[in-house]
Amino acid sequence: MAYLPPDPDLDAEDDGGGPVKSFLEHLEDFRWLLMKCAATLALCMLVCLIGANYVMAIIKWPLSQAKVHYPGTNQVVSVSFGTNHLGNFPITHAQGQLLGTENTNSKIRYAAVVIEPVRLGTNQVLSWRVIDDPKAIADMERMHIDLVNLSPAGGFFVAFQVAFYGGMLLSTPVMVYFIAGFVFPALRIKERKYIYRAIFIGGGLFLVGVSFCYFVLMPVALAASQLYSQWLGLGAFEWRAEEYIGFVCKFMLGMGLGFELPVVILTLVKLDILSYTTLRKMWRYMIVINLVLGALLTTPEVITQILMAGPLYGLYEITVWIAWYWEQPDRAKARRALLLLVLLMVLLVYLTLLGWQYGWPWLLQHSPWLQTQMH
């Protein structure tokens, strides 16, 4: 048999690079992959179960940062007795004048009052005193929700839930490494290069999405949930612990996965599976998909659904414009156009945040119809 030299025109980047295995050998590798992933998840869950109180404190942090809303425009007073906080109470204008927390010239929305014993002759009575306590006033603007268990075994279920979500987060990088070791031998060198980039950038975007949800969206979503309950005339100061944990973790996980969308789409663009024209035609479908994801991964009400769907669609638009940039022959001109678009988007987000922080409270204060609806 004649010797056939290798084809010099063969593209080295098309080399699969892995050994040829039979179906049973692949099945055996897959079995070991599942065993290693399961063992990693179990070990990380055990670590989180041991430190469940610390993990729970991290999960509860957005709750302490959420802003509480008091219906109407009445003054709210924080009442304390010694070192004990008795509560926050809305009062009328006449009660505020009686307590001395407001006068006819100005009105302060929040005030702090301390009750203390006072001796009058041989008698000791309770009196009140208006104090300047910025810490107490700042505390009034934060939500105070009690997370409760309503069953004898509720604490065990909550601990397992905390351990599961925490274990998933800790074990994900290791499991991705194991999965890569299983899949990469079947990929070409060119495909591996793109997948390596996708994993690196995707991991960063996942952390950005989780952080954005944890520090920015979550306090807003929790405050909106309480506001919506008050609008319905329902009490919203006690929540089931397992439902709160599930909501927070699913929201952060969904937002983290949603931030992976640009990586997936742009990888498909690089592999010539998608193009800018195709992505531009899909914008209507993406709105529906983002709204469906917002409904599935958050509580079944429209506020948090929009809070999640909005950033996801914004990421999709950014992805579409990056795909457009890659197809442009004049990259310098395309960069200038993209820079202008980014500046406009930043300005829009900034104005939206200003409207939520200052415009909405002002509207509540000056709109009689909204005040009536919020009561």
Image (cartoon, rainbow, N blue to C red):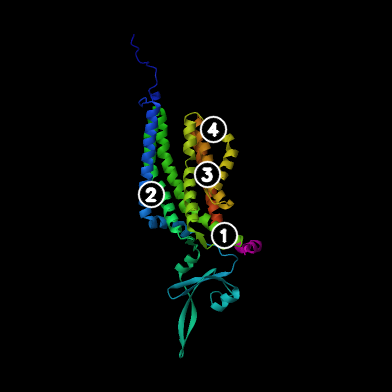
Secondary structure under tag 3 reads helix
State whether residue 229 is above or below residue 254: below
- Of pointers 1 and 4, the one earlier in the residue sequence: 1
Q: Nearer the viewer, residue 324 or 79?
A: 79
State whether residue 332 is above or below residue 169: above
Whether residue 340 is visible here, answered yes or no, is: no
The residue at the far right in this view is: 369
Residue at x 59%, y 34% (from the top left corner):
281
Q: Nearer the viewer, residue 107 or 279?
A: 279
Label 3 amino acid?
Answer: Leu
Q: Which mark is residue 45?
A: 2
Label 4 amino acid?
Answer: Tyr
Coordinates of residue 14 in the picture (x, y in percent): 40, 24
Secondary structure under tag 2 reads helix
Callout 1 crowding tier (Cα within 10 Å): few <14, some 14–19, many ≥20: many
- Of pointers 1 and 3, the one earlier in the residue sequence: 1
The answer to if 367 sits in the magenta stretch is yes
- Of pointers 4 and 3, the one earlier in the residue sequence: 4
- Of pointers 2 and 4, the one earlier in the residue sequence: 2
Coordinates of residue 306 in the picture (x, y in percent): 57, 49
Magenta segment: 358-375
Quote the CA–CA distance across marks 2 and 4. 42 Å
Quote the CA–CA distance across marks 2 and 3. 30 Å
Label 2 amino acid?
Answer: Met
Q: Is residue 213 left or right of residue 288?
A: left
Identify the residue under disc 4: 276
Indicate which label's residue lies in the foreground, 1 or 4.
1
Identify the residue under disc 3: 312
Indicate which label's residue lies in the foreground, 4 or 3.
3
Indicate which label's residue lies in the foreground, 1 or 2.
2
